[in-house]
Image: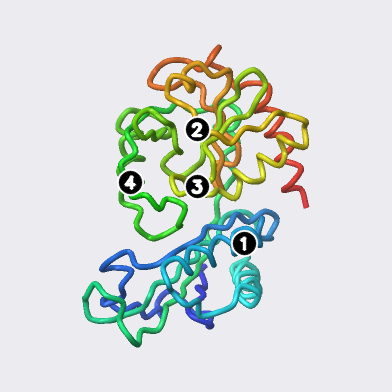
Amino acid sequence: MSLTYLYQDRFVSKEELQISPEDRGYYFGDGVYEVFRVYHGRLYEAAAHFERWEKSAAALRIPLPLPSGELTGRLEELIRINGLSEGTVYMQVTRGAAPRSHPFPADTKPILMAYTTEARRPLNTMKEGISAVTMEDIRWLRCDLKTLNLLPNVLAKQHAVDQGAGDVILHRNGTVTECSASNIMIVKDGAVITHPANHLILHGITRAVVLRLAQGLGLSVRETPFTLKELRAADEVFITGTTVEVTPVISVDGVPVADGRPGEITRRLQNEFEKTISF
């Protein structure tokens, strides 16, 4: 079945999409995006996603063509039209089309586009865990903005693939930041520790949910930088993200994390997360 797309304020087929070759998203990655998880045909944590969407667009000075309240309804309709029960909604906006020139063009019209994708939950890796490798984080210093400039993340993920690993753990001069497309947390002596939500990491929606769940379990939560040395001495390591949910990391650079099995606190957080998606 051919999928329907949201283009500007209309629902169209893929063949009807009219994206100009002069779109600044092609030239400069001049745009922002969001990926929403869909469970049981419903957007998960929609308000948090839209808050980040608006923040990123404002920082890039891209006027949004539709207010978030109206756009929420359009995405819900897109899900219904495409019959999506479980998967994702990808949404992006670019500054628009204009002859190639670095300064903001005067009269462009932002281009909005969204589509749905069926995707199963990563139940196997959530149960068994993944391996990870480390890599220096040399991206720009506004990682808190969810822009289309993802080539550094693509290269990082490919580095993990080349090493036969599930993901890469990025660090700046030995201080762990995040992964290629997810946030990372460690557990030490019963405390959940993760990098603070500043300009060096993306403020993950699932990250925020998991921190709330940890606090609800009475766990100590510390948003503070930690080092590669502390990562390797952790009792547990796990990543969080829209598509990975809460996934254990059982080895780093070929060395097992603790006993090389998913830890108790990770399992407890997975169980609590499961409750949040059981509408």
Q: CA distance from mark 4 to mark 3?
A: 14 Å
**At 55% from the left edge and 55% from the top edge, which residue is drawn?**
118
For residue 46, side relative to residue 60 (left or right) = right
Residue that badge 2 annotates: 225
Locate residue 73, reporting x and y percent.
Answer: 66, 74
Do the residues bearing badges 2 and 3 touch, measured as CB atoms within 8 Å? no
Locate residue 107, reporting x and y percent.
Answer: 35, 87
**At 36% from the left edge and 35% from the top edge, which residue is drawn?**
172
**At 31% from the left edge and 80% from the top edge, which residue is drawn?**
97
Which disc number belongs to residue 198?
Answer: 3
Locate residue 33, reporting x and y percent.
Answer: 46, 62
Front position among marks 2 and 1: 2
Nearest to N terminus: mark 2 or mark 4:
4
Question: Depth check: 35 or 189 in front?
Answer: 189
Front position among marks 4 and 1: 4
Do the residues bearing badges 3 and 1 touch, measured as CB atoms within 8 Å? no
Q: CA distance from mark 4 to mark 1?
A: 34 Å
Mark 3, secondary structure of its residue: loop
Nearest to N terminus: mark 4 or mark 3:
4
Nearest to N terminus: mark 3 or mark 1:
1
Question: Depth check: 199 or 131 in front?
Answer: 199
Compared to residue 8, the image places residue 242 above or below, namely above
Nearest to N terminus: mark 2 or mark 1:
1
Which residue, as the protein is rendered here, is positioned at the far top?
259
Residue that badge 1 annotates: 84
| Residue 238 lies in quadrant | top right
The amino acid marked with disc number 2 is Pro
Q: CA distance from mark 3 to mark 1?
A: 34 Å
Residue that badge 4 annotates: 139
Neighbours of disc 3 within 10 Å: few (<14), some (14-19), many (20+)? few
